[in-house]
Image: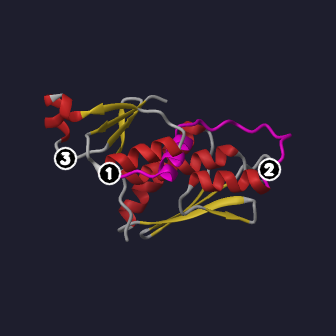
Amino acid sequence: MEVTLYTRQDCPLCDEAKKALHTAGLAPHEVDIDLDPDLRRRFTNDVPVIYVDGVEAFRHHVTAEQLAAFRLSQEKCVPCRGGVPPLKGEELAALQHELGSDWRVVDAHHLEREFRLKNFAEALAFTNKVGAVAEEQGHHPDIYLAWGKVRITIWTHTIDGLTRSDFVLAAKIDRLLDVVPQRT
């Protein structure tokens, strides 16, 4: 993963971003926008900006937890052929912490999260985006769609429990929120 941090000197938000990147174990290529007139025009006061593999991932504020979840979302789901035990204990807790969002681990068996959206059309659009990601990853969640609400349940059916791929899919679904706004 190639990480570039666009920053400037004497910027407290930039300092926080550097600390978060360091805490997440990432060593970015740092670019001071004030040293390049084109970058200064492009970003003005909108720093810090973090690019991952050439694509903007974060702007203004980022935490180590957000970076960990982002890294998880960049992985691919690996098909489970069975014969492996479901995640338990510390390993399960570590992945839940890495995911760091509103997903709940239910009975150490499955992940569940409910998304609130403005109306049925947005909920349906979000459901279709989740379906596209699931199809691309070959890992398919249970989806409940209602007016302004989508509930997603994820587990690996082959072993009747949770694997790392379940958390990867959850992180990928969370990244869809950058496209579809949530209702507060």
- For badge 3, the amino acid type reads Asn
Q: Mark 3 or mark 2, which has the lower sequence index? A: 3
* Residue shown at the point (56%, 43%) measured from the top left: 72
Report the number of discs: 3
- Look at the numbered disc 1 and give the secondary structure of its residue: helix
* Residue shown at the point (86%, 40%) measured from the top left: 83
Q: Is residue 83 magenta?
A: yes
Q: Which mark is residue 13?
A: 1
Q: Nearer the viewer, residue 60 or 117?
A: 60
- For badge 1, the amino acid type reads Leu
Question: Label 3 vs label 2: CA separation?
Answer: 47 Å
Could you tell me if residue 59 is visible in this image?
Answer: no
Q: Which residue is mark 2?
A: 86
- Look at the numbered disc 2 and give the secondary structure of its residue: loop
Q: Are marks 1 and 3 in contact (CB under 8 Å)?
A: no
Image-based side of 184 in relation to 41, left or right: right
Res 89 quadrant in image: bottom right
Specify start and end residues of the magenta stretch as a single range.
60-88
Return the x and y of residue 12 as percentages of the image width and height.
Answer: 31, 51
Q: Quadrant of the C terminus?
A: bottom left
Q: Which residue is mark 3?
A: 45
Q: Mark 1 or mark 2, which has the lower sequence index? A: 1
